[in-house]
Image: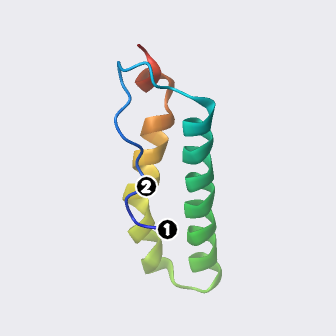
Amino acid sequence: MSVAFAAPRQRGKGEITPAAIQKMLDDNNHLIQCIMDSQNKGKTSECSHWRLPIHCLLYMLSPDRWVV
């Protein structure tokens, strides 16, 4: 999986599909797993690497983004 997790901009385009939302949720799950794995291995510095991608996904999933 690449670092570019954020979905294409969908605001105002009416292209919100359950599949797109599920993909973002799956990507979020993957990032959370990576963070947990890093923490369990004592590599807390690696956790900051995942901060921006997970922030972008959470922003994309926020209800305010889906207003058409």
Which residue is nearer to you in this view: 40 or 31?
A: 31
Helix, strand, or loop for circle 2?
A: loop
Q: Is residue 31 left or right of residue 54?
A: right
Q: Residue at x 39, y 65 (%)?
A: 3
**How busy is the neighbourhood of tag 2: few (under 14 within 10 Å), some, or many (20 plus)?**
some
What's the amino acid at mark 1?
Answer: Met
Dot 2 and dot 1 residues touching (CB under 8 Å): yes
Instruction: Indicate whether 10 appears above or below 59.
Output: above
Taking the view exactly as shown, the residue that stands out farthest to the top is 68
Q: Residue at x 40, y 47 (%)?
A: 56
From the image, tell me which residue sits under label 2: 5
Residue 47 x %, y %: 47, 71
From the image, tell me which residue sits under label 1: 1
Instruction: Indicate whether 10 appears above or below 47.
Output: above
**How busy is the neighbourhood of tag 1: few (under 14 within 10 Å), some, or many (20 plus)?**
few
Residue 53 x %, y %: 41, 56
Position of the C terminus, as image quadrant, is: top left
What's the amino acid at mark 2?
Answer: Phe
Q: Residue at x 62, y 52 (%)?
A: 26
Residue 1 x %, y %: 49, 68
- For residue 42, the mark is none
- Alpha-carbon span between mark 2 and mark 1: 8 Å
Instruction: Indicate whether 40 appears above or below 65.
Output: below
Residue 60 x %, y %: 44, 37
Helix, strand, or loop for circle 1?
A: loop
Q: Residue at x 58, y 46 (%)?
A: 23
Q: Is residue 30 left or right of residue 53?
A: right
